[in-house]
Amino acid sequence: MSVNTTTTADSPASATKGVSLPAPAAATGNAKIMRTAGVILLAIGVAAPFLSGNFLIFQLTMMMIYAIAILGLNILTGINGQFSLGHGAFYAVGAYTAAIMMDQFGVGYLWTLPMAGIICFMVGFLFGLPALRLDGVYLALATFALAVVTPQLFKLSPFEHWTSGVMGIVISKPDAPFGLPLNPDQWLYFLTFAIGLLAYVCARNLVGSRTGRALMAIRDNPIAARSMGVNTALFKSLAFGVSALYTGVAGALGAIVVQYISPDSFHFALSVALVVGLVVGGVGWLPGALFGGAFIMFVPNIAEELSKGLSGAVYGVIMILMMYAIPTGLGGLLKAALGALSKRSMTR
Amino acid sequence: MSMLLEVTGLHASYGDFRVLHGLDFSVEKGGISTLLGANGAGKTTTLRALCGMIKRSGTIRFDGNDISGKATEDIVRMGVAHVPEGRGTFTGLTTEENLQCGAMTRSSRAEIARDLEQAYHWFPRLRERRNQQAGTLSGGEQQMLAIARALMLRPRLMLLDEPSFGLAPLIVQEMFSILRKVNQEEQVSMLIVEQNAGVVLELADTAYVLETGDIVMSGTAAEIRDNETIRAAYLGY
Amino acid sequence: MELLAQQLITGIATGGIYACMALAVVMIYQAIHHLNFAQGEMAMFSTFVAWQMLAWGVPYWLVIPLTVVISFAGGVAIERLVIRPLGDAPVLSHIVVFIGLFAIINSLAGFIWDFTIKPFPSPFGEGSQFGGLISNHQIGMIAVTMTVLVMLFLFFQYTRVGLAMRAAAENPASARLVGIRVGWMIALGWGMAAAIGAIAGILIAPIVFLEPNMMLSILLYGFAGAVLGGLTSPTGAVFGGFMVGIIENLAGTYIPVIGGELKLPIALFLIVTVLVFKPTGLFGRTVVQRV
């Protein structure tokens, strides 16, 4: 019974405890609810581009792109317990990869996506190596530094030949292939939609696999995990790589959709927004990424509606109020709600 | 003999998990009571409940005042010093700073200085280490420091959580003889929670045996000590 | 030689500012085990308040203590009203609240005083000494920061409240058991950190000019200093801050590749390198983790 010197505030385990569905007895009921919700969401998703103007389609596409980025962050933080306040850096790398390939090497936009993914995976994995030595608040600090420094990195003169420095890169918007009756915005929407779905399914499978369990074991009790033979170092770096891959692909998509990138597009506000989206959606709850993406896409707009001059302040207030109301995000809220429902149904 | 501490129907829980199921016990003015039991019996929980560190219900009267709803800091200010499990030393502060912390709620500089000297008198080894970081003290010394720190409050009641834990028998003897002296000379009443029944039953007046959140036996220390069935069943010796 | 001396002095002067920010961050970290990412914005806002008072014609020698007091009150208020209600919420939720705070303060400052860059007068005048080796303002920066740091040291080492704060930060449960009101100690810590930040902001504003985004990079340097010194050690953080200031200036001057544009990434590089080789900083204590 010696004095325990770790505090819960420092250990990622308690901070990022995975949000999982309640007890098996009620699981089928809850699973049905979730599945129905999923189907409805899918239906809405498919119908939306035909019912909205181009600007809204653009916003919805960006929302899904952020969701994919947040999904990546969730894999790293929610599943594997490593903080990152600097994921905007990977988003930027993905975006620049796509832009440079299209602009300088004339590569087709579709090919830039897997390329961005591979390059970001490597960058993420490499960043994961020094990150192995860091935990909790220290990792948060290091990644925060990364976020602040990201725009600077892309302005550096040695790289200007490719990045065009502050001037940025302009990309032309692709048309729908095979002469499909979709305008470019709708096409990009469906492309993103498909990739998002694929990303989600892959993430789901990853989490349910042995690798996923290893990642979660590392999150919950790294020392115990290592003593059970889990190669902590490898898995943690892999987690960083996979996470960066997701966010990088999102970045590439983002570049294509927005058609222009410059170093200042990747201000640290982006990294910070991704964290906000992660928490609001529910750390460790993969579907929450969509809610998170919606939050960071639309709430700033709402804030601006409420007060043009003080939009940042309104956004901040909303963020803080959300944290008081649902500190564990939408995922945590649903878990509590479904848990309460199942308890009630069991006592009936 | 009047009661300094009277507890009736004490319930306590960690979240939804009920740990104590309605305890009744007391400590006489100037007396020493002990709460015995194995690991997991709820001994530490009881002391925490008394100090308001966890969710509890029931009646707790200290010197006639109801403290069942009070916050820890306020209970301390009434004269209750808790020497917690694990000693709770401020490892980053020096020995002397730890002692000064014990007197944080008192106002008379002169009296505090006098009590500091008295603490070093009770525990000479602490004087040698007065400017050393408390974390570098040995287990026995830290336990002495914890007790000394509690005494700096000039408490009426001292709660001690397993003071003998992890200490060599000789040190335990030394410590308990100091506690006896403190009780007799300073009129400090004590509630001692212990697994090491043998040692504490030599010191205490009254004993309670705790088993998974219930008091299963109570009586004078002598009664418990001499009762072979109890000793075999609950105290393992 | 003269260039080296000048750069060293500049390094020490700005290092003092980073030391203050590092100290503020570490003080709050020790109290609540969270990093206040909005520390810079709070300092910036305080500096604007000072600027406003100067604009209204309040004499400088009055502005500084007034700003310090207002900032102190502001820090306490933020802790009580914004941070306190969070309680035991997960770390990431705390981070989001700090981000929200950042956004609110930044936006408010921009709204009230707009985003144009404003010059900020130095309380020490525009001149310089020793043939231009060191400016009056730099002398002032070093003098003020040293005074503040020494006063804080004395406060924590030799006063009862200082001891209570240290105890509360180190072991809140034990602190309660000796009757310390831990909640008040935390609020006090926030107030002091805000006041220190205000001083840092007022001192750096004449150099970097006043605008709502001025403190982000300063905060980053402050973090770098805190990391270098160790988040568990206030003295370490101060030392770290000075080191960062010196390294930043010397590297910027003497290493050709690192011009103005790499100054900030240096901070990142520093942080990561220190953390990789000595995770608890130069003076930090290693915390033992039990399974």
Image (cartoon, coloured by chain):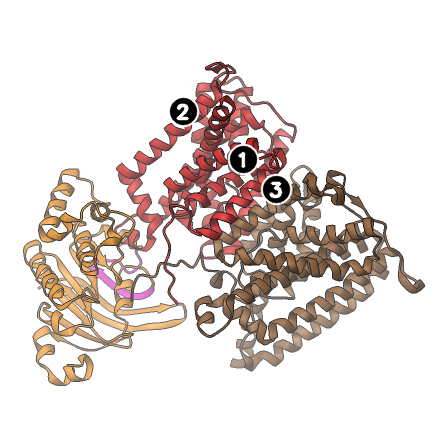
Chain colours: A brown, B orange, C red
Three-letter amino acid code of the residue under disc 1:
Ala
Q: Is residue C194 visible?
A: no
What residue is pinned by disc 2?
Answer: C143
Against C119, residue A261 (above or below) is: below
Q: In terms of secondary structure, where does tag 1 sit?
A: helix
Q: Residue at x 44, y 30 (%)?
A: C68
Three-letter amino acid code of the residue under disc 3:
Ala
Residue nearer the viewer, A333 or C280:
C280
Is the same chain shared between marks 3 and 2?
no
Based on the picture, tell me whether residue B59 belongs to the magenta stretch: yes
Q: Which mark is residue A313?
A: 3
Based on the picture, tell me whether residue B173 belongs to the magenta stretch: no
Q: Residue at x 37, y 33 (%)?
A: C149
Q: Main secondary structure of the magenta part?
A: strand
Residue A145, image x, y percentages: 56, 46
What residue is pinned by disc 1?
Answer: C251
Q: Residue at x 46, y 51 (%)?
A: C277
Q: Quadrant of residue C239?
A: top left
The chain ID associated with circle 2 is: C
The chain ID associated with circle 3 is: A
Against C139, residue C237 (above or below) is: below
Q: Residues within 10 Å of mark 2 (few under 14, many from 20)?
A: some
Residue nearer the viewer, C261 or A43:
C261
**Quadrant into which the N terminus of chain A falls:** bottom left
Asked if labels 2 and 3 touch by Cβ distance under 8 angstroms, the answer is no
Q: Spatial distance from mark 3 to mark 1, Cα to Cα?
A: 37 Å
Residue C156, image x, y percentages: 31, 39
**Span of residues in magenta:** B55-70
Q: Residues within 10 Å of mark 3 (few under 14, many from 20)?
A: many
Residue nearer the viewer, B181 or B2:
B181
